[in-house]
Image (spheres, rainbow, N blue to C red):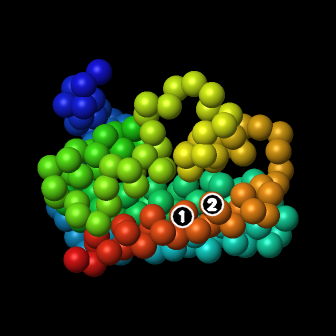
């Protein structure tokens, strides 16, 4: 499916289901919504370390992903959109980057979080969404210390770029 077809489907899904829609929807941009998503992102980033310190580092991977995801939702809100679907969020952010509407985040950064082109050997993918899924759906209960530190560093670097984008 082409990117424009994907986005069209996302907007169609956004028209159905009221507040429980499962797509993209145009909204009024508000600083409050942007800041609320940023606050949630910071909350999730702090949870990464808390989970690690409590010996629940498998949950650190989920907190990492959702810290970044809420950063992306903040960027969408800044542009006047709401998403209730991860693949729609990634497709729309990719579109914003391609059109030059996002300057501090690039396609390579977005692919650090999720790369739709990776469809095999997911067990060895180091994309943040794939790490989250491995930890969430496997029986592993801990990230190795080095693995955690790398994930935390990558999350912070990507989130800092999102923050720059919002503060421009």
Task: Identify the mark at residue 99; answer none if there is no mark.
Answer: none
CA separation, marks 1 and 2? 6 Å
Numbered disc 2: secondary structure: helix
The residue where tag 2 is placed is: 151
Numbered disc 1: secondary structure: helix
In the visual, does 5 lie left or right of 123? left
Quarter location, residue 69: bottom left
Position in image of residue 61 (x %, y %): 65, 55
Cβ–Cβ below 8 Å for labels 1 and 2? yes
In the visual, does 107 lie left or right of 103? right
The residue where tag 1 is placed is: 155
> Badge 2: how crowded within 10 Å, few (<14), some, or many (20+)?
many
Quarter location, residue 73: bottom left
Quarter location, residue 105: bottom left
Question: Is residue 119 in view?
Answer: yes
Question: Is residue 8 in view?
Answer: no
Position in image of residue 48 (x %, y %): 66, 67
Q: Give the residue displayed 75% in from the left and 62% down from the top.
A: 146
In front of the other: 77 or 134:
134
In the visual, does 115 lie left or right of 141? left
What quarter of the picture does the C terminus occupy? bottom left
Position in image of residue 22 (x %, y %): 37, 37
């Amino acid at each position: 499916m082409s990117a424009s077809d994907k986005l069209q489907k996302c907007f169609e899904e956004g028209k159905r289901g009221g507040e429980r829609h499962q797509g993209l929807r145009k909204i009024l941009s508000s600083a409050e919504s942007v800041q609320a998503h940023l606050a949630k992102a910071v909350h999730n980033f702090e949870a990464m370390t808390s989970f690690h310190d409590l010996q629940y580092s498998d949950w650190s991977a989920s907190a990492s992903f959702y810290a970044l995801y809420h950063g992306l939702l903040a960027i969408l809100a800044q542009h006047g959109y709401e998403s209730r679907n991860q693949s729609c969020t990634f497709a729309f952010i990719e579109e914003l980057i391609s059109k030059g509407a996002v300057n501090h985040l690039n396609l390579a950064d977005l692919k650090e979080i999720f790369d739709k082109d990776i469809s095999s050997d997911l067990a060895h993918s180091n994309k943040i969404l794939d790490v989250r899924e491995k930890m969430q759906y496997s029986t592993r209960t801990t990230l190795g210390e080095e693995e955690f530190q790398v994930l935390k560093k990558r999350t912070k670097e990507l989130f800092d770029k999102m923050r720059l984008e919002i503060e421009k």
